[in-house]
Image (cartoon, rainbow, N blue to C red):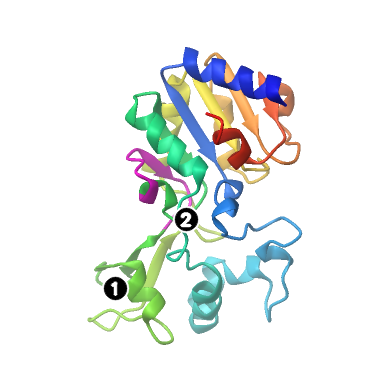
């Protein structure tokens, strides 16, 4: 393990255009539950399966039920960035990390101080009225009773990508551009099974592809370095 950390540090030292691509595993060490692990949201028992609740159809047809789950399970306002978020912000400040591409919706990278963050699945921090498009912050939504409503009377929807909804093209294109220009791509805390996000790795043409995840991924064979360990353990030594 020490040898792999040493290798990782050498790669970081040699690279000047690093892109970090992260999934739920980046935030679990802040206490935020992931989706697919044994204790994840998708393996908990609800009146409806979480995949169904987090779909566009369910949001439109059962908005109140959606918000019960959303407010109960996806409120990340009380959580703080962990060592991985903080080290990435530090590396960005030093000019090493040029962009973060994240599948997370918790806003912890920005809370840690990162400036260039492409949120593939949106963010709980942004919410809009479906009628007049007025903006509302996360506090307004999570503090509301029942379905959060706009001053115009319209229903407020979180700016998160639900099942059946497409990713934002502008965000995806910016992420692709950053990855294609990078000399090092660190992929961490993701099983790389969710498409289209997982497909973004194919755009990397740089020198070092590093995968950090507790379990194996379908892309391990492509990587220059694979570390199957906790992100906190790895980044605390950077």
Residue 47 in percent (x, y) is at 68, 81
Q: What element carries label 2?
A: loop
Residue matched to label 2: 105
Residue 230 in percent (x, y) is at 66, 41
Residue 88 in percent (x, y) is at 44, 36
In this rendering, the answer to whether 173 lies above or below 146 is above
Compared across the picture, whether 237 is left or right of 110 comes to right
Q: Which residue lies furthest to the bottom in this view?
A: 145
Q: What stretch is highlighted in magenta?
A: 111-123
How many residues crowd around disc 2 within 10 Å: few (fewer than 14), some, or many (20 or more)? many
Q: Distance between the residues labelled 2 and 1?
A: 23 Å
Residue 148 in percent (x, y) is at 37, 80
Residue 197 part of the magenta segment: no
Given contact means CB atoms under 8 Å apart, are the residues at marks 2 and 1 in contact?
no
Say which of 224 and 79 sits in front.
79
Mark 2 or 1: in front is 2
Is residue 23 something that shows in the picture?
yes
Say which of 216 and 161 sits in front.
216
Is residue 173 something that shows in the picture?
no
Say which of 166 and 236 sits in front.
236
How many numbered discs, if any?
2
Residue pictured at 39% horizontal, 37% vertical? 89
Q: Which mark is residue 22?
A: none
Residue matched to label 1: 131
Residue 122 part of the magenta segment: yes
């Amino acid at each position: 393990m020490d040898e792999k950390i040493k290798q990782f540090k050498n790669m970081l030292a040699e690279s000047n255009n690093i892109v970090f691509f992260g999934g739920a595993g980046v935030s679990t060490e802040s206490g935020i539950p992931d989706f697919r692990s044994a204790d994840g949201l998708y393996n908990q028992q609800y009146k409806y399966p979480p995949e169904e609740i987090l779909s566009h159809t369910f949001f439109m047809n059962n908005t109140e039920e959606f918000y019960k789950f959303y407010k109960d399970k996806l409120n990340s306002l009380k959580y703080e960035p962990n060592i991985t978020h903080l080290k990435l912000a530090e590396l960005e400040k030093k000019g090493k990390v040029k962009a973060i591409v994240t599948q997370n919706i918790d806003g912890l990278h920005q809370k840690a101080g990162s400036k260039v963050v492409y949120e593939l699945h949106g963010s709980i921090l942004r919410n809009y009225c479906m009628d007049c498009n007025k903006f509302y912050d996360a506090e307004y939504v999570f503090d509301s009773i029942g379905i959060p409503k706009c001053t115009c009377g319209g229903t407020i929807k979180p700016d998160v990508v639900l099942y059946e909804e497409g990713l934002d093209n502008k965000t995806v294109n910016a992420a692709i551009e950053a990855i294609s220009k990078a000399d090092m791509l660190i992929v961490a805390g993701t099983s790389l099974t969710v498409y289209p996000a997982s497909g973004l790795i194919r755009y990397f043409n740089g020198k070092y592809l590093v995968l950090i995840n507790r379990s194996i991924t379908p892309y391990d064979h492509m990587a220059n370095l694979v570390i199957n360990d906790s992100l906190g353990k790895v980044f605390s030594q950077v």
